[in-house]
Structures are given as C-alpha cells and as structure tokens.
Amino acid sequence: MADNDTQWTWNFTGPTTMSKAQSRPSTPREIAWELTGIDGNTPGCLRTHPAFKNITTFTASGTLVNFFPITVIYNATTYYVGYVVVREVTGTPDRTHFDFYLSSNGSTVTTFTSQHTVDAIGLEVDIQCSGRYAYIYIRGYPAQVVYVASGTPTLTKLPAGPGLVPTVETQIDTGAVSTISAPCGVVSATITNAGSGYGSTPPVLTFTAPTDPGRTAQGYAVLSSGTVSNIVITDQGSGYNNASPPTIGGFGGGGATATAVVNPGVATGSTTGRLAVMVDRRGNTGKTLYKSGNYGFAVQFLDSTTGRKSQISEIAYLEMPRNNNADQNLPIMLRVWFPSYRSGGAWVRGVGTTPGVYDKALIYRTVNQGIAGGTLYGNSPLHLDSIITAPADTSIVTPEGINLRVADTQLVYQDTFAGRTRSDDVPPQGGVAQFLGSTLFVSRVLGNTATTLTDSVTGVTPPNPPPGVGDLRWSTTLDTQPENFSQFSRWVPQTPGNEVIAMRRVGMSMLGFSTDRMYRISRADSFIKVEEMHVGYGVAGKDALEAIGTMTYLVSGAGLKAISADGQLEDVTSLDTLLNVDWASYKANLKMAFDATGQCLTILKPSVNGPDGEAACMWFGTNRITMLKDLPFKHMRSGNWIVGGKNVRRSLFVKRHNASGTYGVYIVDYERSLSGTNLCGGTARNVQFGAVSPPGPNPAPPLSPTVYEFDCAGYNLDGTMTRSTVADMSDAGSAPNYYNSNWSVAPILVRWVGGNIGFQMQPDQPEFKDFFRQKQVTNAAAYVELISGTFDPTFTQSWCAQVYEGTSDTAIYTATPVNQSGTKVSTVSYVGNEMPRAPFGQHGVMGASLSPSFVFPVCGVEIKLLAFSLTGRILDTQRRRV
C-alpha cells in the first residue's frame, strides 16, 4: 500500500452531545479527548476559562486546616455572608482557633478572630448555620453556638445545649409567708482537710439543708491516693444563705472536711451577681382562684433575642384539697428560679447553671384533674399558661407577683408543650453535622454524651441507651430546637465501622454516606426513618460530594456516581480514568463544590506543593467536562456570597498569598469583569508576562518581583514551554532561569488534546483507527481569535502544538509557529492572510498512535480556538520509523 498524504482537521464550532458515556469533555472523542482551561458554558468554540478573581483576604497565623462558608440572619432585613477559618497554632498547648468573617455587601468584611478556641489540634470539625446561629461541632469536644447579637455586627458565643433541667415549685398561697429570699445554690466546694485512709469506695457526701425555702444541694467526693481530692456538685440546690454558707461533712472516719461556696447575691441593695427570682401569684389583687383538685406545672426558659430554649422542668404537682367536703377557691404560688443573673446591666450566664441568656419563663400547666383517685397527670397535656419576664431591677430581694392569666375553660385552646422527651444537657460531641429542616443531625460521635440521668455517686452521666459504634443523633423534630437532643433520638448502624461520615440534603430527604454504603434519611411527621441502601457504594472522603437540586454527586471507590433523592443510582463514566487512575491516591482528599452562577460542579484535587492542584469542571448548561491545571487552592466549598447585590451560591476557593499568613478567597469571574487580582497577586488578568529580572534595588519594569505571591506556575515562552513553580517572585533569583527570559506568570493554561489520529479512506467518510500503519505529522496550524488582552511586542510566541504517543502524559515533541521565513511569530496577531504553521522538526514526528495537542499558556489574554489541523501522511505498512 502506497503512502497517503493527508490532513487531519478538527472543527470546534459544532454542537456538543448530551451523552454521559462519552469521553471526558462530553464531546465526540475524535474532536476532543481533554479540554483544559476552557469555558464550558461557551458553545461553538473553545474559549479561555473566565479565570478567578479575589473577593476578600484574611490573615491566619499558624496552619490553615479548614474553611467553612456560612450565612447567618440577624433580622427580617439584615443578613450576613461569610466564612469560618479553622487554623492550628502549635505551642503549649497546641490550640485550634475558629475565626469568623462576616459581610453584608460582599465587599466589606468584619473580622472576629479566635471566636472559639480548643486546646488540641487534628480535630474533626463541622459548622452548620440556622437563622442567626452558627453551630460548631467537634468530634470528642463540646459543641459551641455562635450567634449574631447585634446588627453591627457583633457575635456572642455560648456553650451549645439546653443545660441543666430547670425547676419550679408550687405552694398554695395561704398568705402565711410574707417574703421569699432569692434562691441561691452551692456552686463549688473547697476542701479544708483532705483526710486519709479512704478505700476504693467514695465516701458519702451530705449537704446541710438550706436556710430559706428550697432544696438541698447534692454532689459526690472524688478520691485520689486515699484522700479526697475534689468535690463535684451535681445539683446546686436553692435557698442557701450567702452570709452563712453551709459546711459539707459526712466523710466517714477519714476526717475530711470542706466548705461550700454559694452562688452570690441575696444582700439587699446588691447590684451585680444576683440570681433573678420570679414568684407567681403572691401579693396581687384580683387573684385567679383555683378550685379544689390536682394541677401540674412546668417551666421552660426562653431567650427572646435568639429563640433558644432550655429543657422543660420536671412537673411540679399540687393538690388543692377540699375543706369539709367543699371546694376551696385559693390562689396558687409558683416559685421559678431563673438560671441567669444580671451583671453590669445585662443578663449573663450563671456559673454552673443552665447555659444561655434566658430572660423569659414559659409557664405550662394542666387543667384541673379532679380530686385524689381521679388524677390523670400522665395523660394530661401541658398547655402554655403565661410568659413571665425576668426582673430588670438587680436590687430586688422580694419576689414579684404575676397573675396566671388563663382559666381552665380557656387553657385547652393554648399551645401545648411539643417536646417528646427530656433532652440531653449538651449536644453530642460529633464531627459531622447537617440540617434537615429544623432538625440537626450529628454523626461521628466520640465519647459519652451527658444526659439528664446523672449518677450521684460517680458523677458520670450515663447515656440511655448506651452509645453504639457509629451513632447518628438528631435533635427534636417537634420544635425548632437544634440544640436539644433526646437520649432516644439515635440510630446505630448494624455493621460496625459503617458510620455516617458525610450528609447532604436532597429535596425533602437527606442522604448519609459511609465509606461503603449509603443511607436515606427521611422524616414522617415527628418520626425519623433511616434506610440502608447501595451496599458497596460509599463516599471516598467527607468532602468528596455535593448536592445539586434533586441529585447528589459523590466520588466513590468506583468513580463518580449520582444518586437521586429517591435512591436511584447512576454512573457518570466520563471521569473514570481521571478518578480511578490519575487521582486514585487522592480520592480521600478530593473536594466538590457547585457554582450556581456558572452552573458548574467542580471536583478539586487540592494543591500539596505550590500550584500542583487540578480540577475537573462539569458544566451543567452544556454537559461539557473540562479541566483546570496549575491550581494553588488548598480548600474549596460551596457557600453564599454577595456579587452585584445578589446573594448566590458560589464555589469559594482559598489560596495562600505569602509566607506571613495572608490568604485570599476567590470565585470564578463568570462576569469577565477583569477586576480584583489574579492568582499571583497581579492586577486583574492582564500583562503578567515579560522579561523577569532578578531581585535588586532597581527591578526592570513592568514586573517588580515583589508584586507576585506564593504558589504560582510560570511558563517559558521562548520556545521550550518549560513549566516552573513560582514560589515567590521576590525570590526570583533562586528560581530556574528567570533572568532575561519571557515568562507567563499564573496563566489559565489552555490545552486541547485530540484523540488518536486515524485513517480517512475517502473524504467525508468515517475515520477508523489503524494502529498497524505509521503516521507522520509534519506541521500544525490553528485558527485562533483574540477576544481580549494584548501581547507584549518583545516576544512573538503565543501558542504551540504538541504530539503525544500512545497513552503517555508527556509530549514527545513541541512545535512553535513560524512564518514563511522561519521566524517565530504570534499567530493571534498575524498579518494579512498569512497562516503561520508550527513545524515538527525537519522530518516530522512518526508513530502508530499519535494524539495532537494545542497549548496556550499566556496570562491575561483571552482567545477562541475555532479549528486546528495537522498535515502529514499515512505511511506504507512496510515502513518503519528510522
């Protein structure tokens, strides 16, 4: 068979396909095998990616380990977008810091550094937001809640959880008691004599009774080497007199003694540190009178500013007996102890009491259940009777009287208490959290979660039921209380090790993912249902998934999968080679984020050493899949940001700027505004190339080495197409061969790679592969249009053509365009009708399996590639490469 001269031509103006089973760009394989640095939303050509723009910066000393976009709401008209930076600072002790950054307009950012700290590093962290709250969950450590306290904005941090169970006491108001002192409890105890000779059983601890009406404090002793080393208070009690604190004795024969410290503040005229007291139905005129019968009362505290609620108290029962077989009509007195005290004119959390700034008390009661023998406490619902407010005057020493407002005939029409069971004092110590409506789910729980069932001997709060390996916990489903977790609201996987490591909400349900299976989590009224499905298909890493509409995309051990809200699983095979071969060892560290503006799902392989990160971009508008190379981003997440006055879901990327700990947050510049800075700190995206001089007192313009920042890639445009990492251009003298060379710094690398060239028997006939015949490629040509930007006149090269052999990732030859005289030219600014071609040496490139490539590494210049062609021949079957 004779040699055949031929020309291979690729036209990029044709339509794309909707098939997910095609090659990576989702275009026919003969047109494109790889698209790098291409805008996937532009049909009909290969246009340069819009690039990135810097929207804000922050400083983080230590090591940046995580990044969480957040959105919090202050009121009906004010909200904030922002992010939380998690950083580790080594020292004594090693410490993890949580820094908050909030913005109301997308440009001005308010900084709140070290809003929370933990004396540990290597933590598993998740942050979820609801309303004005940001919930910080840390595996093995107490959760925290940070909320917007004012519209300035200002932030306030409190321990998460409803805290200790409040108490309420009832009494028939006979008028015998004229005043009631503020109930003060025992907050701590000081050991005055540690004693000796104790065995392994802790001694019995006895508190003295309070001097005022109240309840006796409770606690237990802790032993160490036969002596009493500590006293733990489990119930502070109430009614203790601050002037004469009780002593604590009853340690057996060991001789240990201690004194108690009482919560401050009963003295008349005290202005700080007083416990607030509210007494219902004392001293009022026009009292509501109660018929003889049985009543139940309960209290729940409310922070009217944020909406947080405490647990509900135990029900306090009161029986109004008959007198001579006749009904008595008497008022009822309630004593409610607020868990906060006023300091400096503001309510603050009391030491050792219920966390939160509770300023309201919700009083619930039952209707009259009749006289003894007809009690129905357990079946009678609690109805909201009244709401009382904590006193504003800190000098009050006598109780205020507030009348119960609702009679029995009206009480049944009021709201009932909706909580199903008692909540834990604190939320579970989990590292993964996700909201489904108003219910918060938490997994990756480590350690026992304190509940309301406190052991008075050991002080340990035993979970009920005991925790299992892989607990999934959720907050109450009957009220908007994401901090209140019932000890019975839990699910444990049957197979140990299959705990949920990631969750995403999809439609009206939520999907949970372990390392080798999936779970569908749904709500039916107040009930939660967890269904196991797709055994063997788990998620590769906790960040390697993203929810979009009714689908969740995730990277699994078998590649990219898409699962719908109803559990239907689909394969997305276009990225199989990339995920299962090229990125196989990076799967656990992959991150995914969706950008609503560009309709683009990004799968990021974070950078490790400078600009070695990569990303696969799935463009939902055109069904193209493109790549990005030379990325310096270590973190990426989806989050809201205000762009052009609109709050939209964007993909937020984080990059290091310099060695002093300055970082930048970037978004894709879909508007092509050319605003902000590029990835290397230069202005916008233009003119980031030229003759780079080494550092010195008078660096050559236009490139001052100090303007460039960390983690950038540079390309030599003198014909070698050498790629180097630009760690910091202020250190250009130590970088390889920057002096007097044309370098394009931090470009969006544009690269197109076609499939293996074949043999076209006749014009307009399908091409077929023939790997038993040699192909010889002599030169290449590209039809390129300049969209924006300018070229430096001091150099000519703008693109090059490359040829790959077989499945190699390294080009075997790089050809640069020349004119008819053999001089290198810029084919984007060619003169007249001259179409420069790029020759592949004197004799061309020969091989049985050859793939062409077009490469454009110039920063600040936007182009369109409309067509590409190769000229060469298909050799006789007897010809061999020489």
Image (cartoon, rainbow, N blue to C red):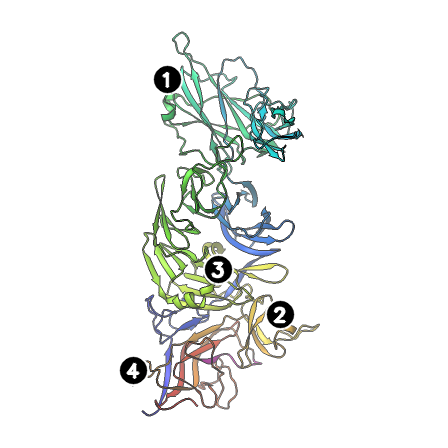
**Sequence-first disc among 2 and 3:** 3
Comparing 619 with 61, the one in front is 61
Q: Over which residues does the magenta segment extend?
A: 793-804
The answer to whether residue 457 of the structure is visible from this angle is: yes
Residue with the mark numbered 1: 370
Nearer the camera: disc 2 or disc 3: 3
Asked if the residues shown at circle 4 and circle 2 are in contact, with their CB atoms under 8 angstroms apart, the answer is no
Tell me residue 850's x, y (percent). Answer: 40, 81
**Sequence-first disc among 4 and 2:** 2
Identity, as a three-letter code, of the amino acid under mark 4: Asp
Number of the label disc, if any, that sits on residue 589:
3
Residue with the mark numbered 4: 764
**Sequence-first disc among 1 and 4:** 1
Q: Is residue 133 above or below residue 453?
A: below
Nearer the camera: disc 1 or disc 2: 1
Q: Residue furthest right?
A: 697
Identity, as a three-letter code, of the amino acid under mark 1: Gly
Identity, as a three-letter code, of the amino acid under mark 2: Met
Q: Is residue 403 above or below residue 843?
A: above
Q: Quadrant of residue 338?
A: top right
Comparing 868 with 167, the one in front is 167
Number of the label disc, if any, that sits on residue 729:
2
- Mark 4 and mark 3: span between their CA atoms? 46 Å
**Sequence-first disc among 3 and 1:** 1
The secondary structure type at the circle numbered 1 is loop
Tell me residue 833's x, y (percent). Answer: 44, 86
The secondary structure type at the circle numbered 4 is loop
Asked if the residues shown at circle 4 and circle 3 are in contact, with their CB atoms under 8 angstroms apart, the answer is no
**Sequence-first disc among 4 and 3:** 3
